[in-house]
Amino acid sequence: PQIVVSVYGPDFFGNDVVRGYGAVHVPFTPGRHTRTIAMFVPESTSTLQKFTSWFTGRRPEFTDPRVVAQGEGREVTRVRSQGFVTISFNVV
């Protein structure tokens, strides 16, 4: 099993935009586990698309969270690194 994390936040105009996506596998062994998730955000492919998304306030984002959890099809998606999220698990 995996946990998919989608982080949203306000931009300069006050619109909620995606700040990052990430996924991590849930540990099976009992105990307390800490995992650091590398976050990434999709990018526009052309300068015109970048300007249009900035002007309209609609940045590229994934509509299906399964894209983040699966590696299939992500090799053709342009993304950039966007920080880290630390998550703690208490597995019984």
Image: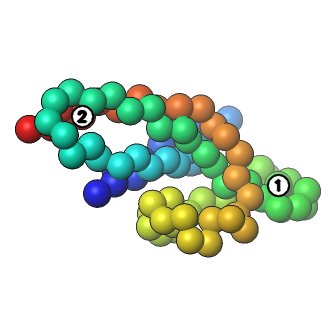
Nearer to the camera, 72 or 47: 72
Where 62 falls versus 4 (above or below)? Answer: below
Return the mark for residue 7: none
Nearer to the camera, 65 or 75: 75
Image point (28%, 57%), residue name: 1
In front: label 1 or label 2: 2
Where 80 falls versus 64 (above or below)? Answer: above
Nearer to the camera, 40 or 17: 40
Q: Earlier in the sequence, mark 1 or mark 2?
A: 1
Counting from the top left corner in percent of width and height, residue 19 is at 57, 42
Where 50 falls versus 40 (above or below)? Answer: below
Counting from the top left corner in percent of width and height, residue 51 is at 85, 54
Amino acid type, label 1: Lys
Horizontal side of residue 56 vs 74, given as left or right: right
Where 2 falls versus 11 (above or below)? Answer: below
Image point (53%, 31%), residue name: 84
What residue occupies the far bottom of the structure in this picture?
Answer: 73
Horizontal side of residue 79 vs 49, given as left or right: left
Counting from the top left corner in percent of width and height, residue 55 is at 79, 52
Horizontal side of residue 64 vs 55, given as left or right: left
Whether residue 3 can be seen here? yes
Amino acid type, label 2: Phe
Counting from the top left corner in percent of width and height, residue 35 is at 38, 33
* SS at mark 2 in the image: strand
Nearer to the camera, 81 or 46: 81
Q: Residues within 10 Å of mark 2 (few under 14, many from 20)?
A: few
**Residue under numbered circle 2:** 89
Whether residue 56 can be seen here? no
CB under 8 Å between discs 1 and 2: no
**Residue under numbered circle 1:** 50
* SS at mark 1 in the image: helix
Figure colour scheme:
rainbow
